[in-house]
Image (spheres, helix red, strand yellow):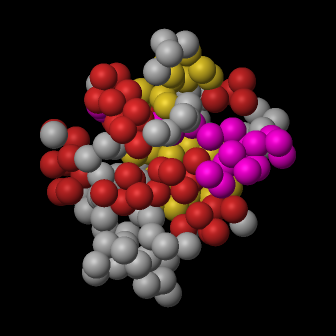
Amino acid sequence: EEMEKQMAAEGGGEAEVGATGEEPAPPRSDEKPHATVGKPAPDVSWTLLDGTTQKLADLKGKVVVLDFWATWCGPCVKGLPKVSEVTKKLADQGVVFVACNLAEDKATVEQFLQKKQLSIAVALCDQELGGKFGVKGIPHTVVIGTDGVVKKVHVGFGPGGEKQLEK
């Protein structure tokens, strides 16, 4: 709840979608790439739902898609299955997907995954880890290239978001 309030205060969550929350926000002519784009991804690790620790550095050589989300975030709930679908289609090309749940407990996340019938790798992350990727609003999707450099960041989710990710 605290994180939800903080993200709302910072303009997070649905700030990047259009008025109805369904369509993407109109492009802004002054929009600059996210501050992390073009920089090496931070040296981080996380704990997966099964209790194992995973290091981002161990995934170097693969394209890594990190999707920061929470069960209470409407656009996250809509986007997560679509991001999962795209990354599963590209898995044989070396794409790895990690759904980085922000600050929720294991039981909440497991219940959500069961209800939504999602079988994905979920990392239990805190605000500090999210902050290393410049997360201020969710969903916040980070694409890291095989060289370990952040290639693309997208905040928000709307129709067609999966097509952008596939590109």
Task: Quadrant for residue 114, please give it.
Answer: top left
> Residue placed at 34% from the left, 43% from the top?
70
> Residue placed at 34% from the left, 22% from the top?
106
Name above or below for residue 57 compared with residue 156: above
Side of 131 where 21 appears, left or right: left
Q: Position of residue 15 (x, y in %)?
A: 31, 68
Specify the segment rendered in magenta. 85-104
Residue 7 or residue 161, whichever sits in front: 161
Residue 83 or residue 142, whichever sits in front: 83
> Residue placed at 55% from the left, 73% from the top?
160
Seen as rendered, the residue at the extreme top is 51
Q: Which quadrant, please, contains the C terminus?
A: bottom right
> Residue placed at 69% from the left, 62% from the top?
166
* Residue 43 seen: yes
Q: Position of residue 24 (x, y in %)?
A: 44, 76
Task: Quadrant for residue 124, please give it.
Answer: top left
Does the stretch in magenta take in 95? yes
